[in-house]
Amino acid sequence: MKNKPLIIILVLFLIAVTIFIVGRMRRSDLTEEIEMRLSSYDEKQTVQIAGEPLLTSEEIKAFYAERDFEEIWSENGKINSLAENFLEEIDHVKYDGLNPEDYNQILIQEFFEEIEGKRKILKPKSTPELVDLEFLMTDAFLRLSKDLEVGKVAPNARGSYWKLAAKESKINSRDLLEEVADGLDLHKALASLYPEIEMYAKGREVIQSLYEKSEDDTLSWKPVSFEHSLKVGDTHASVPGLRDRLKFWGYLGAYEVKDPLLFDSTMWKGLKSYQLENGMNPDGAIGELTADFLNDSPEKLIEIASVNLERMRWIPEIKWEEELVLVNIANYQLDYMNDGDTTLSAKVIVGKEYNESPVFTAPMSYIVFSPYWNIPPSITHDEIIPSVRKNGDYLREKNMEVVSNSGEVLNPKQVNWTGKEGADFPYRIRQKPGGSNSLGLVKFMFPNDYNIYIHDTPARSLFARESRALSHGCIRIQYPDLFAEALLKDKKWTKGRIQEAMHQEQEEVVKLDREIPVLLLYLTFWTDESGNAHFRPDIYHRDTELIKKLKAPLKTESKRRS
């Protein structure tokens, strides 16, 4: 009995060897070919199909080694249903604003046809084409899963305006593919990678409907323009085409048209609904902005929606169901959200084209009532100093004062205005609290590297404008008192107390009892809770460049099989 442990070890060893041998005997011919093909590459070589390297070669090698080189996309020499479903999913990535050809679509289709053709003649159990197909589809899955989760465009290529931290991947694509191979529903697996924003999935549905509409070739989308705005009662040669476009988008039903060239009252009503839905002043007149929107074909709107779904994929984890201040720069709107509901919406004014408001997030921590405006050095150099030189009373007229670095208020007549300028100017200029202060009566502070904050403005009439890219980069808010009331949950901050604090001669800093995330986004397309699409003008011309990057092929000098 002294040899019993040795006997047990020997038996276990024999069992293990038997399992290994049986397992090897059960391996398919294709599994053997996959192992042979991958073994032919050295450590630094890439897997190549049709003379072109696959971008996920290292992951492909690791993935198949982990599963003992067993195939996924075929069975007994036949393309399986999983492969067929995935080819369909690849075609559907166009609804994500992605290009199916980036995921080997054309080559995969060619291999499908070739493999099926050979089966009808030879009925092989294993072919080199099945191995090629295996690698192509695995490469497509690994790349697509990454692009769906964190975006196709690399963080360093997103534009200098995008200041949000790169989204971190939480999914191991190889593990997810293994789960799919073990039976996880393929569509659900890919959908699990979508951003945790409800409007993303609804945005996909919008793009799908736009593709369906793009098949209607009965309309001409040739751009139209006018010498002046068209108003109800005007006649113009472009009116019939514009009427058809309003019908196409569902803003105008069929009705009897007595004069096709006449901009009639029925068309006027439909146009007002169209303008309201698309963020324009519903004045019922066809001006430049309305004409630009009506010129956008379904194909153009697909491009706009696509770049915004890509932006949604870039957004890092945000707790949408908690307290949040959301500013959509392109929509000129601020939404204060709490517990998933929007409790306050307000128009905003954003940075003009050469002072663009960036995309970033920072926590709001305090409010300043009756604030001073510490004028930035750039404005001091470009605007204030030249104005003082022309008019010695300029500072007094603008309720401004000169302050030393130690905080001492100086007599402007004792300052040498012809000396150092810009960054070398030795003093600060600030505007005193009051109704004429450029910051208005209150500012909301979320310290950041861009010197951006939300504030009131004395120029209230600007909120009536259709286009409101007018500031130096900060966000001016339409209802600052209501915003302050929403943020200050302490009962002592009544409406009257807030109004009193906003009309003081000295500024008052009020620290919030919690930090509130502020998120500045730039979305020219989104959907509401009902799934309705909303498009806005690309005020900073950021969409065009992103469209190019989304359309750019992932592989250079892409080759087709001959």
Image (cartoon, helix red, strand yellow):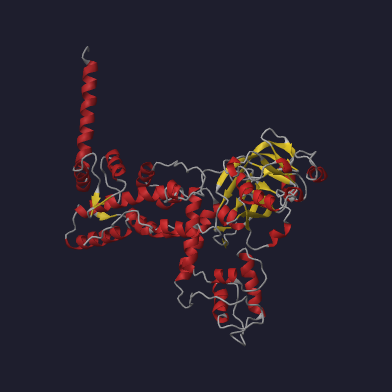
Q: Position of residue 176 (x, y in %)?
A: 39, 44
Q: Position of residue 105 (x, y in %)?
A: 33, 58
Q: Position of residue 253 (x, y in %)?
A: 60, 77
Q: Could you tell me which residue is drawn at 42 percent across and 53 percent down?
A: 187
- 121, above or below 409, in the image: below
Q: Position of residue 436 (x, y in %)?
A: 75, 51
Q: Is residue 270 left or right of residue 224?
A: right
Q: Is residue 149 left or right of residue 451?
A: left
> Can residue 304 be seen at all in this image of the molecule?
yes
Q: Foreground residue, 355 or 37? A: 355
Q: Is residue 518 left or right of residue 129?
A: right
- Farthest residue in the left direction? 122
Q: Quadrant location of residue 64?
A: top left
Q: Foreground residue, 79 or 174? A: 174
- Farthest residue in the bottom direction? 258
Q: Is residue 116 left or right of residue 345?
A: left
Pick the quarter of the image with the C terminus: bottom left
Q: Foreground residue, 173 or 501? A: 501
Pick the quarter of the image with the N terminus: top left
Q: Quadrant location of residue 174?
A: top left
Q: Could you tell me which residue is drawn at 65 percent across and 55 percent down?
A: 349
Q: Foreground residue, 400 or 185? A: 400
- 508, above or below 125, in the image: above
